[in-house]
Amino acid sequence: QFDKASIQNTLSKWVASHGGTYSVVVADGHGNTLTTHQSEKVFFAASLYKLYVAYVGYQKIDDGTYGLDESYLGGWSRGKCLDEMIRSSHSPCAEKLWVELGKENLNTKLKNYGLTDTSMTALTTSARDIVKILARIEQGKNLSKESRKAMLSSMKAQIYRSAMPKGFVPAVVYDKVGFRELVEYHDVGIVELPGGERVIVAMLTQNVGTQNIAGLASALFKVLTK
């Protein structure tokens, strides 16, 4: 139903006419690619690593290893920490669970999912890997309905809204950001278009900034909803 040629043309024109480094993937809700630009480029993940940690953390809730209500950190329950590492990008919660799950164990699990560009020890990832994990979340793969709903609720309510959510208006954006000062700014998520279709978008950037990410999102929104 999507015009791949128009989407690709919109993305190519934007990248050619704007400075900075863009790595972008737009896919349908199943993770099938609609358009890409430098999708395999590896970036410092910044707080995007929390998306991977939360995804595996919820699997451990589902299999009974951990409990949502157990006391976890600073008076917060484990469930509260899982929510806040996405909603407010709370680092102490994410770092504790990251160590608890085991960084090498996480690497192995992600490689088994086909994520070849991501390291949970070096904290690197790519747009194409992010789309794979977002597709797993969207499809509820290895997640209970409750855990999928909880992850999406946290992403919908995450507090950094000046990039993709500002551009994909009036779509509903379930996203996670990661940034390091002004060098990298990444915004990735599941976008529910007004017609009900859902697409997955990953924008990993260097020296671009939130305003231009929002601008690209707005340009893509127009062609996705034609």
Image: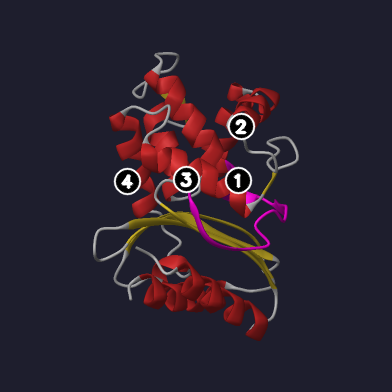
Label 4 or label 1, whichever lies nearer to me, is 1
Image location of residue 123, percent across then percent down? 70, 43
Q: Nearer the viewer, residue 160 or 13?
A: 13
Q: Quadrant of residue 108?
A: top right
Q: What residue type is labelled 4?
A: Ser
Q: Quadrant of residue 112?
A: top right
Number of numbered markers: 4
Q: Are marks 1 and 2 in contact (CB under 8 Å)?
A: yes
Q: Mark 3 or mark 2, which is nearer the start of the sequence?
A: 2
Residue 34 percent coordinates (x, y): 49, 60
Which three-letter amino acid code belongs to the residue tagged 2? Leu
Answer yes or no: do the residues labelled 3 and 1 have beta carbons within 8 Å?
no
State the extent of the magenta-drawn residues as a range.
Answer: 31-49
Taking the view exactly as shown, the residue that stands out farthest to the bottom is 17
Of mark 2 and mark 4, the one earlier in the sequence is 2
Above or below, 215 relative to 40: below
Residue under pointer 1: 129
Amino acid of disc 1 = Asp
Q: In which quarter of the image is the N terminus?
A: bottom left
Q: Looking at the picture, how far across and down is residue 85, in whole percent?
A: 48, 42
Q: Where is residue 54 in the image (x, y as percent from the top left)?
A: 49, 35
Between marks 2 and 4, how big is the CA–CA gap?
A: 23 Å
Neighbour class for label 2 at 10 Å: few (<14), some, many (≥20)? many
- Asked if 68 appears above or below 41 in the picture, the reply is above
Residue assigned mark 2: 110
Give the labeled residue for mark 3.
Answer: 134
- Report the disc number at residue 153: 4
Give me the residue at 53% from left, 49% from top: 131
